[in-house]
Amino acid sequence: QVQLVESGGGLVQPGGSLRLSCAASGRNLDYYAFGWFRQVSGKEREWVSCINNAGSTHYADFVKGRFTTSRDDATDTVYLQMDSLKPEDTAVYYCATVLLLNSCHAAYGYWGQGTQVTVSS
């Protein structure tokens, strides 16, 4: 059993920054990949970014150059640094993880509860 808890969401003005955290626990996570997803109410969940066990990252086109994903294996925490935020970034952001080596594209098996991000003036 792997448990994930997201935090760091809130209200921010367009052009501002926010840092989301995903605290993981329950197993040794050295060989797990992590992904960030977001969902607007009434719409489909969409992939935002991911990071594999070796720290390699991938990003959706709509966040490239603005968002950065990182992981701290000493604390089993994954981060999503969001800069130059836009109103269309408003959504509930979810962290997910899966046992996977050398990749971060997969069907994720464990999910957090989500954290709300609202970008508005």
Image: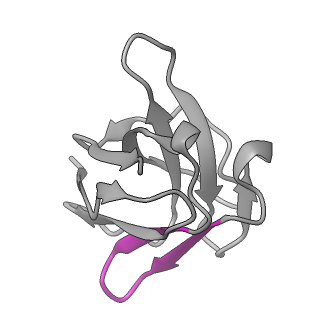
Query: Which residue sits furthest front?
Result: 121
Position of residue 109 relative to residue 99, above or below, is above
Residue drawn at 77 percent across, 57 percent down:
64
Residue drawn at 29 percent across, 57 percent down:
9
Residue drawn at 77 percent across, 66 percent down:
65
Spot occupied by residue 33 in the image (x, y as percentages of width and height): 54, 57
Spot occupied by residue 111 in the image (x, y as percentages of width and height): 32, 40
Query: Which residue sits furthest top?
Result: 42
**Dominant secondary-structure state across the stretch colored magenta:** strand
Q: Of residues 19 and 71, which is closer to you in this image?
A: 19
Spot occupied by residue 39 in the image (x, y as percentages of width and height): 44, 28
Residue drawn at 48 percent across, 13 percent down:
43
Position of residue 120 relative to residue 79, above or below, is above
Q: Of residues 106 and 23, which is closer to you in this image?
A: 23
Q: Of residues 63 and 12, which is closer to you in this image?
A: 12
In magenta segment, residue 56: no
Query: What span is in magenta?
Result: 67-82
In magenta segment, residue 79: yes
Which colouring convention does the figure follow? Answer: one colour
Q: Using residue 29 as the reference point, say whether residue 105 is left or right of it.
A: right
